[in-house]
Image (tube, helix red, strand yellow):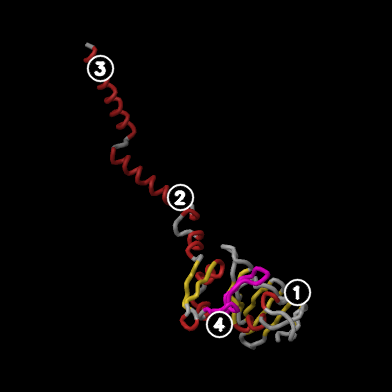
Amino acid sequence: MRSIASVRTVGIVIGAAAVALIGTACSTDDLAQNASTSAVESSASIPESTSPTSDASKVAQAANVKVEGARGVEVTLTGPIAERYSSATEAERKILRLPLTGSRNAGTRESGVVYQQFEGGVITAPNDRPGTPAYVTYGKIRNAWNVERDGQGVPTVVGSNGSAGPLGPVASDVETRGHVQTTRFEHGSISHDTKTGKVTVTVNGKVVPSE
C-alpha cells in the first residue's frame, strides 16, 4: 500500500507540473528562445567602458607605437605622444612626416612638457601621464612659437622659445576657420592667415611682433 501511495503522489506532482507548463504556454523551445534573447539583451547592455574596443583599450594599445623615423631609424613613441599620433588624421600625418631622432628632438622639458619633433611639425603634451591631451603644431604657427622672445613676447636674441618661452605650452591643435589657422597656448595664441600669409602672435592679451 505504501508503494502504491508513493506512485500516486509522483503522478500527481508530474501532472501538476504539466498543467503549469500548459497554463503559462512555455514549451522547452520557448524557454530556449527566451534564454537566447536574454543573452543577446545582456550582451547589448554591456557598458562601452568594459568592451574590448572601448576607448580605454585603444589608449592602452597606443601606449607604445613604433614608427620608422628619418634615415630609416625606428622610433618608439610613448604615452600621450603615442596616443595623439595614433589618432592623427591622414592629413596631419602627411604634414608631420617622419619623426626625428636624437635627444634634442624628443624628450621632457624641466617643466614636465614632453615633445617629439617631426620633419614637418611637433607633438607636445603638458606631461607624460597616460590620457593627458597632446597636440599637433606645424607650419608658420610652429615657426612663430619657436622664435626667441623676452618675457613680454617681444622677439629678442637672448630670449626663450617654445614651451619655455612666454607663450608657454600648446593648449590646442591647429583650429581652422575659413582661411585662418589658430593655435592656443597657455599664455596666448598664434594665428596664421593662409590667404595673406600674415601671422599674429598674442601674448597675455597683447599682440606682439611675430618675428
- Check the image and name the residue furthest to the bottom: 196
| Circle number at residue 204 | 1
From this view, report whether residue 53 is shown above or below residue 207.
Answer: above
Q: Residue 28: image x %, image y %? A: 28, 38
> Which disc is residue 6 wearing?
3
Q: Between residues 47 and 21, which one lies in front from this camera angle?
A: 47
**Few, some or many residues within 10 Å of mark 3 (<14, 14–19, 20+):** few
Q: Earlier in the sequence, mark 4 or mark 2?
A: 2
Q: Which residue is identified by label 4?
A: 120
Q: Residue 45 got which mark?
A: 2
Q: Please, what secondary structure does the residue beneath circle 3 have?
A: helix
In magenta stretch: residue 116 = yes
Left or right side of 189 for 86: left
* Quarter of the image that includes the C terminus: bottom right
Image spot of residue 197 (x, y percent): 64, 88
Q: Mark 3 vs mark 2: which is more N-terminal?
A: 3
Residue 150, relative to residue 54: is it above or below? below
**Which one is closest to the eye, mark 4 or mark 2?**
4
Residue occupying the point 43% across, 51% down: 44
